[in-house]
Image (spheres, grey):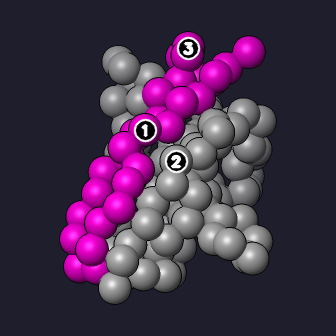
Amino acid sequence: QVQLVESGGGLVQAGGSLRISCAASERTFVNGAMGWFRQAPGKERELVAVINWSGGSTYYADSVKGRFTISRDNAKNTIYLQMNTLKPEDTAVYYCAAGRQRVGAPLAAYRTDYWGQGTQVTVSS
């Protein structure tokens, strides 16, 4: 059973930066992907960014393109989300999810077999 533990959330002013991390308890799968979702109060959970096993392919939601960067360190079984130029609308609980890529499907459609418990990111105006 893969366990995912997020860290690095907190309170930051608008325009600031924050980096959150997600450490997996074991090596994720061959063809595995890892990504970040977020859920704001009263809203549905949405996909933010995804990265494939090699790190050579990424996906970003339109709302974060150019501001957020996802990366991974497979030696540490860890992915990161560098968030720059943060906006109040980025306030949410950020969740890490891991799973296999679906053959022939876009990276964003990867299977989310395992979830972390989330880390709160709050951006003040």
**Is 3 within the magenta?**
yes
Considering the image in quadrants, where does the N terminus appear?
Answer: top right
Looking at the image, residue 44 sits to the left or right of residue 78; the answer is right
Expressed as whole percent of the image width and height from the top left, the position of residue 98 reads 64, 37
Expressed as whole percent of the image width and height from the top left, the position of residue 73 reads 34, 30
The residue beneath circle 1 is: 7
Q: Quadrant of residue 67?
A: bottom left
Judged from this view, the residue extending furthest toward the left is: 16
The span shown in magenta is 1-29
Q: Is residue 3 above or below residue 19?
A: above
| Secondary structure state at the residue bearing disc 3 | loop
Marks 1 and 2: in contact by CB < 8 Å? yes
**Is 23 within the magenta?**
yes
Amino acid, disc 1 = Ser
Amino acid, disc 3 = Glu
Amino acid, disc 2 = Thr
Marks 2 and 3: in contact by CB < 8 Å? no
Looking at the image, residue 71 sits to the left or right of residue 39; the answer is left
| Secondary structure state at the residue bearing disc 1 | strand
